[in-house]
């Protein structure tokens, strides 16, 4: 048997290739939409992908199950558990096998058993794996978003992201019951989770790629709580804000993502089109570094740097029903950005421009916009003079831990919806942990015509490093 893990750092997402080398058959678990990586890996091992499955209807990335099945002819295996309002709307007409708790299927000599583990979502499955060529007991389990290293999948997403009201407490109780059932399995089982540190599908995921049930039983906080009520309170407390695009991902993945038929690079557009696009109100996303954007950018463009958080903030801030355009540093940047956007279903890229477009714009006699920045020393003086409003765009959990005294909290993902809370007179200073999230926020406000904005250089980290006070009371902001 062969087992290979694929990990996408920006999504903090793991998928798996399981192969039976005796028969040449292979299974992919939880594929993302860039399916060529699985096809290449299988070919390199002399395998053909014959089966594809996923643990649940994902919220944080576009599923590649349909794409991979179309690309390889593999058969899909999809959960048929959960209530009628939350089941897959695709698959059966495409030859998929509907799985119930306890159902099994074989990939050559590898036996897969579906284990219904609801809580994170109603339909969630985990998959026990047994290599029958050498064993009659399971080796491990693909836990998806059920059990992570050091954490469990959050049960509040259907309510907080997908809008299913009054579901998260019941989902938390269901998750507790799933864990109780899971505890009956042997300690030696390897656990292969669907996410690692940095994912918004939990609150304290470990960065270790895999674990064992016995280890998690000893050290995972969720296994230590023996009372259902205590578990419900603990698992719902302190969860980060779910990105708004999670609701769109749930809808897309429930219905079945559009089949792309492979990656296509967006069209490079002539720089002469920029003026017309911007004057017409087109959405232009500048993917250069925050400091480069601050030094000079096209008026009306928004900043989303092409870094490890690019997919998160692109999903938060780019509408799914609107065409948009990219500014990239180089040709490698357009491929990276387009792939990242493809993974979260943002396919409406109208084209892209190189970074030279910035210089051309200025060379044609047009002014570049610049992002105002402020140091912690200057901010401290202006706070004392009471002539600035400080807005902390970090998440609410981060703000509650500590914040600049008097700072209000408007998480970046909600900033555009809460413009009425910003003063129109005086200066608004945005800050985050280090300055890049607040840089995105400043660009959003500028694009909305709000120009009395400055970004705190170095964020609250610089403020603390300079010996400035912080409020740890967790009270007083928004």
Image (cartoon, rainbow, N blue to C red):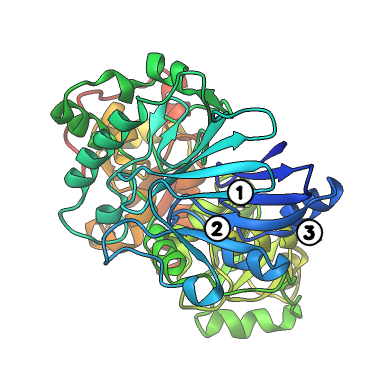
Dot 2 corresponds to which residue?
Answer: 303
Disc marking residue 388: none
Closer to the eye: label 1 or 2: 1
What residue do we see at 13% from left, 30% from top? 229
The secondary element bearing badge 1 is classed as strand
In this view, 317 is above or below 199: below
Sequence-first tag of 1 and 3:
1
Q: Using a 10 Å C-alpha cutoff, classify the residue at mark 1 as few (fewer than 14 neighbours), some (14 to 19) or many (20 or more).
A: some
Q: Position of residue 452 (x, y in %)?
A: 38, 57
Q: Position of residue 359 (x, y in %)?
A: 75, 65
Dot 1 corresponds to which residue?
Answer: 106
Sequence-first tag of 2 and 3:
2
Q: Nearer the viewer, residue 404 or 113?
A: 113
Q: Is residue 109 left or right of residue 48?
A: left
Q: Is residue 9 visible?
A: no
Disc marking residue 330: 3
């Amino acid at each position: 048997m062969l087992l290979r893990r694929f990990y996408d750092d920006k999504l903090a997402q793991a998928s798996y290739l399981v192969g039976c080398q005796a028969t040449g058959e292979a299974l992919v678990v939880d594929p993302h939409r860039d399916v060529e990586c699985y096809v290449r890996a299988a070919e390199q091992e002399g395998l053909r992908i014959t089966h594809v499955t996923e643990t649940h209807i994902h919220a944080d990335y576009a599923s590649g199950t349909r794409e991979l099945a179309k690309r390889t002819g593999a058969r899909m295996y999809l959960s048929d558990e959960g209530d009628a309002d939350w089941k897959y709307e695709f698959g059966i007409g495409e030859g998929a096998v509907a799985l119930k708790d306890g159902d099994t299927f074989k990939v050559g000599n590898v036996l897969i058993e579906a284990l219904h583990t609801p809580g994170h979502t109603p339909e969630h499955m985990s998959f026990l794996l047994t290599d029958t060529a050498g064993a009659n007991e399971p080796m491990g389990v693909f836990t998806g978003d059920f059990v992570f290293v050091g954490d469990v999948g959050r049960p509040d997403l259907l309510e907080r992201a997908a809008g299913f009201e009054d579901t998260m407490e019941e989902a938390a109780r269901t998750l507790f019951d799933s864990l109780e059932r899971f505890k009956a399995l042997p300690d030696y089982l390897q656990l292969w989770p669907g996410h690692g540190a940095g994912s918004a599908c939990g609150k304290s995921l470990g960065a270790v790629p895999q674990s064992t049930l016995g280890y998690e039983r000893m050290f995972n906080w969720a296994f230590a709580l023996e009372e259902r009520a205590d578990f419900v309170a603990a698992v719902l407390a302190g969860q980060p804000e779910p990105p708004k695009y999670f609701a769109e991902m749930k809808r897309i993945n429930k219905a079945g993502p559009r089949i792309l038929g492979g990656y296509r690079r967006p069209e490079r557009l002539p720089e002469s089109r920029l003026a017309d696009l911007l004057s017409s109100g087109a959405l232009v996303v500048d993917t250069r570094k925050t400091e480069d954007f601050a030094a000079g950018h096209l008026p009306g463009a928004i900043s989303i740097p092409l870094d490890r958080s690019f997919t998160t903030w692109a999903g938060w801030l780019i509408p799914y029903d609107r065409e948009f355009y990219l500014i990239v540093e180089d040709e490698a940047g357009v491929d990276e950005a387009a792939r990242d956007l493809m993974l979260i279903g943002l396919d409406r890229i109208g084209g892209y421009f190189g970074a030279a477009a910035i210089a051309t714009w200025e060379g044609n006699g047009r002014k570049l916009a610049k992002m105002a920045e402020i140091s912690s020393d200057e901010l401290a003086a202006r706070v004392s003079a009471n002539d600035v409003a400080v807005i902390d765009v970090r998440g609410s959990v981060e703000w509650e831990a500590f914040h600049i005294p008097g700072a209000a909290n408007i998480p970046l993902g909600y900033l555009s919806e809460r413009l009425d809370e910003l003063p129109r007179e005086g200066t608004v200073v945005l800050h985050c942990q280090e300055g890049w999230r607040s840089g995105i926020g400043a660009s959003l406000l500028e694009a909305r015509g709000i120009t009395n904005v400055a970004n705190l250089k170095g964020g609250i980290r610089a403020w603390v490093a300079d010996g400035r006070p912080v409020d740890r009371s967790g009270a007083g902001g928004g």
